[in-house]
Image (cartoon, coloured by chain):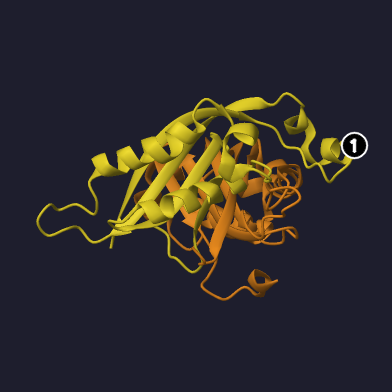
Amino acid sequence: MSEALKVVFGRRYRFAASHRLHSAELSNEENSRVYGKCNNPYGHGHNYVVEVCVSGTVDPATGMIVNLVDLDKFVNGEVIEAFDHKSLNEDVEAFRTTVPTTENLCKEIYQRLKLFPLAKLERVRIEETSNNAFEYAGEEIQDHRADL
Amino acid sequence: MVYLTRKIEFSASHLYHNPALSAEENRRIFGKCNNPHGHGHNYTLEVTVAGEPDPVTGMVLDLKDLKTILQREIMERMDHRFLNHEVTELKGQIPTCENIAQTIWKILEPKITQGRLHKVRLYESADIFAECYRNGATHA
């Protein structure tokens, strides 16, 4: 078996936040039609689960792609502290102009976590509820860090 | 291409310790995973096989056969074992999720002869896992 294997480390995090789906580009009637009760004016909340996958070389000295203590510190600093018990619309700069759907939330979290310096971010998966999940793995542009 | 996944659970103990490092370094890097007498987890293993369904049976491979392979190759090797001491294939490695997943891949890959092993995902707990697949493979 000589084929190169890709190894990915995954970790799940949780935060609770509120949001309201409302697009400034649509009329009130259209917003109500498109987003239904997610458009209710005072917003509502979810317990979000964020699954973060990173890849890289498994260090023979530690058996790890990355020490989860370091990954936790980065994810907590960049995502959990910024989003937990917050209003996504009001408290997160990106969602002042973008609708905080979980699709957009995936992309926002991906943008933040792709700066992680110790491993390559592979994808971000978010469970908005136990029935709805969204995943984003960046656009299909070759990331040069993959070759490092 | 169709992807099928079978899940098994096993319980095992391990510890993280690199004899090339000092006791202090081991403690700093591995934290409580370095506790000398080890600790255990309930592992969940998901094995994904890819292939085209056989036109007669409609199966990529018979799940009974996959179950037998997983029982013989993984359960008998790892279930209720101390991974550092009792699993030959892990000797000399730190039995992290990453290393166990790769070891499981190497054990299973030649045993799966109908369809092709596509992905191995190993959960150490509900929130920590590692997976491996061929470089360049698209996800199931």
In depth, the one of A5 and A79 nearer the eye is A5
Q: Residue furthest left?
A: B56
- Kindly identify the residue that appears in the image at 67 percent across and 60 percent down: A57
Chain letter, yellow: B
On screen, residue B86 versus residue B60, left or right, reads right
In depth, the one of B37 and B138 nearer the eye is B37
On screen, residue B25 versus residue A135, left or right, reads right
Circle 1 SS class: helix
Amino acid type, label 1:
Glu
Tell me the shade of chain A: orange
- Kindly identify the residue that appears in the image at 57 percent across and 45 percent down: B89
Give the vertical position of B57 relative to A44 (above or below). Answer: below
Which quadrant of the rendered structure holds the N terminus of chain B? bottom left
Q: Which residue is mark 1?
A: B24
Which corner quadrant of the image does residue A132 belong to? top left
Residue A129 is at least partly visible in this image: no
Residue B132 is at least partly visible in this image: yes
Indicate the position of residue A140 as horizontal and vertical percent values.
51, 73
- Kindly identify the residue that appears in the image at 67 percent across and 46 percent down: B93
Which quadrant of the rendered structure holds the C terminus of chain B? bottom left
